[in-house]
Image: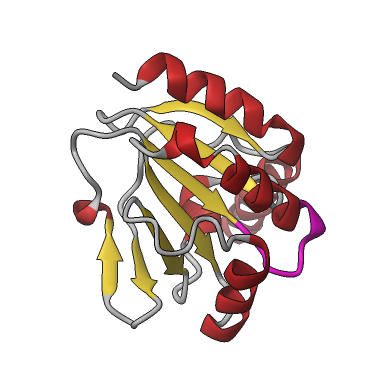
Amino acid sequence: MKYSFTIIVVLLLISLNVSAQISGRPPAQVIPHFEFFRLNNAPFTDNDLPKDKIIFFMFVDPDCDHCQEAIKQIGEKFQSFRKTAVYIISISGKDKINQFMNTYGSKLKGQKNVTILQDKLQQFISKFNPMRYPSMFLYSPERKLIDYEDNPESVFRFVNTINKNVK
């Protein structure tokens, strides 16, 4: 009897976890602890983030049409992102990320406030809770979520939010 009760409790917990994932968890409300890697393989953690800037994370898949469109739009509107720390993150390999940036994000490459990161440990999804590609997160200098979007047509909304919050 005790064994049956344990199995029922475990199945119930698994069921609740699966339904939470299907219904979607909200995006991370504060920047979680993480470890990503620069394209030169140097580690990059949440401790490396600036403490005095708005932080913009964009989680992309280089093969995603919506990601390609979003990164182009951000490049076109880059003037609004100049005072923001921009991080483009992908779980893809370094070659694929470089090809993506060269083809679609060329206006962002080489900008001193833009950092390209590889999620080798596959932490972004479990820690930030993106819903789909591309997922864009805007955090305050206090590391609290200001805005989240996964619709590439909504880049203008980030531009407006950044313009209101950056001094």
Residue 34 drawn at (x, y percent): 34, 58
Instruction: Give the camera-side residue of 154 and 109.
Output: 109
Q: Residue at x 68, y 53 (%)?
A: 11
Judged left or right of residue 150, residue 85 is: left
Is residue 50 highlighted in magenta? no
Residue 8 drawn at (x, y percent): 67, 51
Q: Give the position of the C terminus as an image quadrant.
A: top left
Residue 6 visible in image:
yes
Residue 137 drawn at (x, y percent): 51, 38
Instruction: Give the camera-side residue of 126 and 146.
Output: 146
Q: Main secondary structure of the magenta part?
A: loop
Residue 119 drawn at (x, y percent): 47, 69
Q: Quadrant of residue 125?
A: bottom right
Placement of 91 over or under 153, stated as above or below: below
Q: Give the position of the N terminus as an image quadrant.
A: bottom right
Instruction: Give the camera-side residue of 48 and 160.
Output: 160
Q: Residue furthest top?
A: 164
Is residue 64 highlighted in magenta? yes
User: Which segment did they paint magenta?
Assistant: 60-66
Q: Residue furthest right?
A: 65
Q: Quadrant of residue 40?
A: bottom left
Residue 28 visible in image:
no
